[in-house]
Image (cartoon, coloured by chain):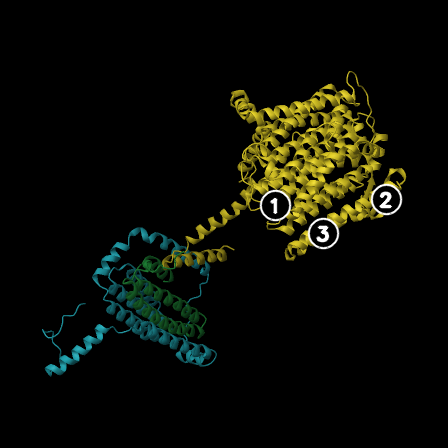
Chain colours: A green, B yellow, C cyan
Amino acid sequence: MFSLGLTGLLVRRNLIFVLMSLEVMLNAAGLAFVVAGARWHQADGQVMFLFILAMAAAEVSVGLAMVLDVYHRFKSLDVDELSEMRG
Amino acid sequence: MISLLWLIPTLPFASALILVLIGSRLSKRLAAGFGVGSIGLSAVITILVAAGFLSSPPPGGSYSQTLWTWIDVAGFRPQIGFYLDSLSLVMLLVVTFVGFLIHVYSAEFMNEDQGYSRFFAYMNLFVASMLTLLLADNLLLLYLGWEGVGLCSYLLIGFWYRDPANGRAASKAFILTRIGDTALSIGLYLLFTQLGTLQIQGLMQRASVQWPSGSYYAVAAAFLLLGGAVGKSAQLPLQVWLPDAMAGPTPVSALLHAATMVTAGVYLIARTHVLFSLAPPAQLAVAVVGACTLLLAGFSALTQHDIKRILAYSTVSQIGYMFLALGVGAWQAAMFHFVTHAFFKALLFLGAGVIINALDEEHSIFRMGGLRKELPLTFWTFLIAGCSLAGLPFLTAGFFSKDLIIWDAWSAQYGYPAFWVAGIIGALLTALYTFRMIFRVFFGPLGMPVTKRPGYAMTVPLIVLAFLSIVGGSLKEPLLGFLGSALPSTIEAHAGALTEIRSEAVAGLIFLLGLYLAYLFYLQRRNLADALVANPIGRALHQWWFADWGLDWIYDKVFVQPFIWTSEINKSDFVDAFYTGVAWLAQWFYRGLSSTETGRVRWYAAGMAAGSALFLAMVVFK
Amino acid sequence: MELAFYIAGAVAVVSTVLMLTRLHIVHALLYLIVSLLGVAVVFYTLGASLVAALEVIIYAGAIMVLFVFVVMMLNLGAPEAEMEKNWLTPGIWVGPVILAGVLIIEVLYLVRGSTAGLGAGGVEPKQVGIALFGPYLIGVELASVLLLAGLVGAYQLGYRKIEKREIQHVADIDEGRTATGRGLVLPGADRPARTA
């Protein structure tokens, strides 16, 4: 799942798709945590997943706000357009 | 009295130091006071020392005074020591006295120039170095003075430094004398390694004991010393710097390049005469150099139109006479000619300075004319000096000294008839160019109007020097006798058909011939001279002699251009490649690394993914 | 139970793959939601019922809804799908697939040999709750701070100065309402046409 998310991140050029792939990656990481917790019968895995969840929520809200800003500024959602910091 | 010897070089040196440090804050009068006063004091002390020396001559004919030990390493102990004998005393008197007169003259001459105190600082430093050179008791201290006068020559020639041509002339002088200095220092190394000391008297003794006449070491050392003398005294082949050195102020030309510095080479050879006696080929070379130079410079002087350049070539020629005298073994005659030459050549230069000043910086004799009525005092003193230079029989000092040399060129131990002929032709040339100059400048219609007349500070030295140029002839017998304690007497080897009287007669006739020819060409019928030059052979010769027999051109082609060429192709040599390579490497890395900063998110993400893959690989395949 | 695990896992993976390759963004979003639901089922089969519920509620429920809101606001539809068609050439998949493939292989290599099956029972929500209020209390507090920061940041970034045109538009609406006495504003001649 993580690799799939990574592939999606690298391939797609639409900013929304990038964020979605990011969500997939986070989800995959959380899944790994929960599985590990279930394997060793400890609550820690699920606790970690809860934290990851909270973090994902915050990140999505901020990220989507930024997407709106980017759209208004650059009039496009192509991540390759957003390369002003090139050297 | 005689123990005041050490003050003689020290006073000008102290004055130079003071002028260097606070000279710019002193008023002109005070700076001149220091500058002129220190030399004046040195002159007075020299007279006192001379009086003491003459009244009660020290034993062995020489007096030594050691100040302190300069270097003490591995048995090499040169000292700051002064050695006074008749030779150095004679030169001391001339240098301080003529130097004093020139300083008085320049107090007025340089009055309108900036850098007044700087001028006197340099002049005082020069005199101090020259006196050190004369009084040194070992060759290392002499070399110190030698270098000091070279430095001051550079500083003074390029005194008006704002004009780059002056700087170039100064550099040329310095570089050419440097070539001679290098030869001299190699000679010093040779002498020290072979004989174990640089003390002059000790050196002469050991040389005469250790080296048989004509031995390889003696010849080599003598040739090296000759090389140094040739550079400093502007003889063939290194004489090309002296005409260009006229770019400096006229008092500088008078002091350095007429009376004192250029005679340092003569002094060196006279001091180390024992060495030259042990090396007959070197001594012959001295004579040949002198003879060739006097002829060459005479021809060149005949074609010049800048009044100072005429006098410069004349100086080269007269020093050629001195070298000729040294070469044939007429040591005392050379020194006698040095004394008289200092008088009349300094006078000629100072007079030229008056003329140049009066005509508002005009140097060309073809634009001058008729100054006889305008500057009468200058005219008479200049005429006296010119006659002395050309050798007016019996009335002038120059006649006695020059004819002594011409006679000795025939009759001395190493004299040859060819040298005599060269001396006679040189005398003819001297008369020709001297009177050409005098007739052009002082006679005929007025060329340019006189704007400034000299004041007392400039005319009094002229009068004094003119007086000395006349009565100096009577010094002949006493001077030669006095010098006998330091220099061997001339051995009259062969006379043959000529006697001294006959030689003098011939020389006198030559003088008259030269005078008449100059009169003919330059006063009566001026177009005759122009006709001579218009003829193609005449023009070619004229241009060739004007360019100093093409030596400048030869040096440029042989030395300067190849040097510039090699330094051009060596500008980016392989050592540079190391440094440029470092820069290139940094730039290469920069280009490479900056291409990874694309600003694209996906690129960075790919980078991170690849990196983590690598890390995992390292963990997995540990 | 194990069968459910495998089926749900397969559904999650397949729908993720489909999500990646869709051109229309709303299709991709919907596939993502399906994937998340699949993962929730996986959680449930592992006995972590709490996180399964949370996954559905928060991840698929809130976060995905945010995505849908933004897509709707930006009006991303068919024209963007055309652009995606141009961007998604087959050749573009090669590099990332290789990179991701390398990572997968490495990870699989690392976890090979650990054969433990699923233990019986799971972790009760009660246990999770005790862990949260116990050792992980500070994490909870930090998470709340993080959420606050996210809130403030999102608000600041999303703030947009309202243009005069929009104020004028609102004023016109009010005027129209009072003028005609009706609550609704109809596009008509007494109002300038709106330039989009």
Query: Is residue B69 visible to us here?
Result: no
Query: For the residue labelled by badge 1, is the local secondary structure a helix, a strand or a loop?
Result: loop
Is B11 left, or right, of C164 in this rendering? right
The answer to whether the residue labelled 1 contacts the one labelled 3, judged by CB atoms less than 8 Å apart, is: no
Is C118 left, or right, of B209 in this rendering? left
Other residues around mark 1 within 10 Å, as few (<14) / some (14–19) / many (≥20): many
Which mark's residue is nearer the viewer, 2 or 1?
2
Instruction: Indicate the amino acid at tag 2.
Output: Gly
Which numbered disc flags the more N-terminal residue, 2 or 1?
A: 2
**Residue C170: assigned label:** none
Q: Chain of mark 3?
A: B
Is A52 left, or right, of B55 in this rendering? left
Q: Quadrant of residue A4?
A: bottom left
Percent from the top left, x then y, of residue B512?
A: 67, 24
Instruction: Indicate the amino acid at tag 3.
Output: Ser
Query: For the residue labelled by badge 3, is the local secondary structure a helix, a strand or a loop?
Result: helix
Picture layout, residue C69 above or below residue B244: below
Q: Which residue is mark 1?
A: B159
Q: Which residue is mark 2?
A: B52
The answer to whether the residue labelled 2 contacts the one labelled 1, judged by CB atoms less than 8 Å apart, is: no
Q: How many marks?
A: 3
Q: Residue furthest front?
A: B373
Query: Is residue A85 visible to us here?
Result: yes
x 46%, y 58%: residue: B616
Percent from the top left, x then y, of residue C7?
A: 31, 65
Q: Which residue is mark 3?
A: B15
Per the model, the C-alpha gap separating discs 2 and 1 is 38 Å
Q: Chain of mark 1?
A: B
